[in-house]
Image: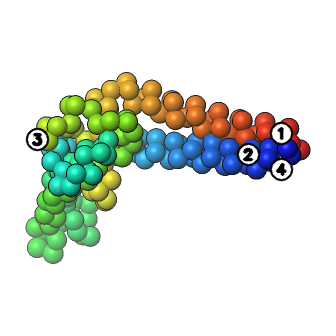
Amino acid sequence: MDTTTATAGGAVLALFGGALLLWCAAEARVRRRVRRRGRTVLATVVAESDAHGELDSAPLLSFATEPAAVGSAGAYGAGAHGVLAVDACELVLTRPRGHTPLRRPPRFVPGTSVRIAYDPRRPGLAVLAPEETGPRALVADLLWTALGLGCLAAGALLLVAAG
């Protein structure tokens, strides 16, 4: 293999593998943080309004956020008159993060209830609850990580061989 081709190929593979590993780590961190610190609610799978939405493997979910106490006067959110101020519930439409199968599983038909966790500060950031993903999510995460490691290793080997 020509030195220029090996260098270019190695650089592309190493960059792709490194970027894929960073993406996998960031997604795992976001899912873990939202599941640990977020609120768990039941969401409903919504029918897609356009034909291309059905091609997305992540279902469109609708859920109402839980009311949160707001206020700056003390830990309990009591206002000037000692009344607890409460944010109104918000209806959110979103797709869960970290859902990467090639096809949408048949259990996500419109009208089905699904347990999710969402970030109260950013309700659009939602992830499926661990019992909804099952062991396939772990297998998918491991396969994406293996692909990233393989590309990174192949790129590094090509760069070493070219140098």
CA gap, disc 3 and disc 2: 47 Å
First in sequence: mark 3 vs mark 2: 2
The C terminus lies in quadrant: top right
Residue occupied by mark 1: 1
Tags 2 and 1 touching, CB below 8 Å: yes
CA gap, disc 2 and disc 1: 10 Å
Q: Secondary structure at mark 3?
A: loop
Type of amino acid under label 3: Gly
Residue occupied by mark 2: 9
CA gap, disc 1 and disc 4: 9 Å
Q: Is residue 150 left or right of residue 9?
A: left
Q: Secondary structure at mark 1?
A: loop
Residue occupied by mark 3: 111
The N terminus lies in quadrant: top right
Q: Secondary structure at mark 2?
A: helix
Type of amino acid under label 4: Thr
Tags 3 and 2 touching, CB below 8 Å: no
**Residue 50 is drawn in which quadrant?**
bottom left
Q: Residues within 10 Å of mark 2 (few under 14, many from 20)?
A: some
Q: Residues within 10 Å of mark 4 (few under 14, many from 20)?
A: few
- Do we see residue 7 in this rendering? yes
Type of amino acid under label 2: Gly
In the depicted structure, whether residue 64 falls above or below residue 147: below
First in sequence: mark 4 vs mark 2: 4
Q: Residues within 10 Å of mark 3 (few under 14, many from 20)?
A: few
Q: Is residue 120 left or right of residue 12?
A: left
Front residue of 55 and 89: 55
Name the residue furthest top.
Answer: 135
Tags 3 and 1 touching, CB below 8 Å: no
The mark found on residue 4 in the picture is: 4
